[in-house]
Amino acid sequence: HEIVSRHLIEEVPLVRCWREYLGMTQAELAGRMEVSQAQVAQWERLNARLRHATLKKLAAALGIHVQQLTLDDE
């Protein structure tokens, strides 16, 4: 899968991989979530540690399942 390989090979954070795959800008995602673009940029940092509640909100805004942002079986 394109997103997983980009995440693993290029070390791009999954939030950014999905956002770009869906053709969305940081500002558009921020608007959907009613947060600032700067907040989205922080979530997209490589070592960002996001709470499960944040991951759920991101997944909903992106129209994907939360597990697609974690690559695990939580």
Image: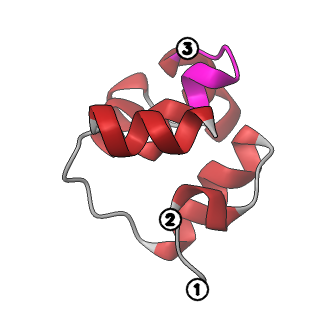
Q: Residue at x 24, y 40 (%)?
A: 45
Q: Nearer the viewer, residue 13 or 34?
A: 13
Q: Secondary structure at mark 3?
A: loop
Left or right of 5: which side holds 57? right
Q: Quadrant of residue 6?
A: top left
Q: Amino acid at mark 2?
A: Thr
> Which of 19/7 is in front?
7
Residues drawn in magenta: 18-25
What residue sits right under mark 3 in the picture? 25
Secondary structure of the residue carrying tag 1 is loop
Q: Is residue 57 toward the left or the right of residue 16 in the image?
A: right
Q: Which residue is mark 2?
A: 70
Number of callouts: 3
* Rendering quarter of residue 33: top right
**Eye-nearest disc, 3 or 2:** 2
x and y, in percent, of residue 14 in the image? 46, 45
**What residue sits right under mark 1 in the picture?**
74
User: Which residue is the extreme one toward the left?
Assistant: 47
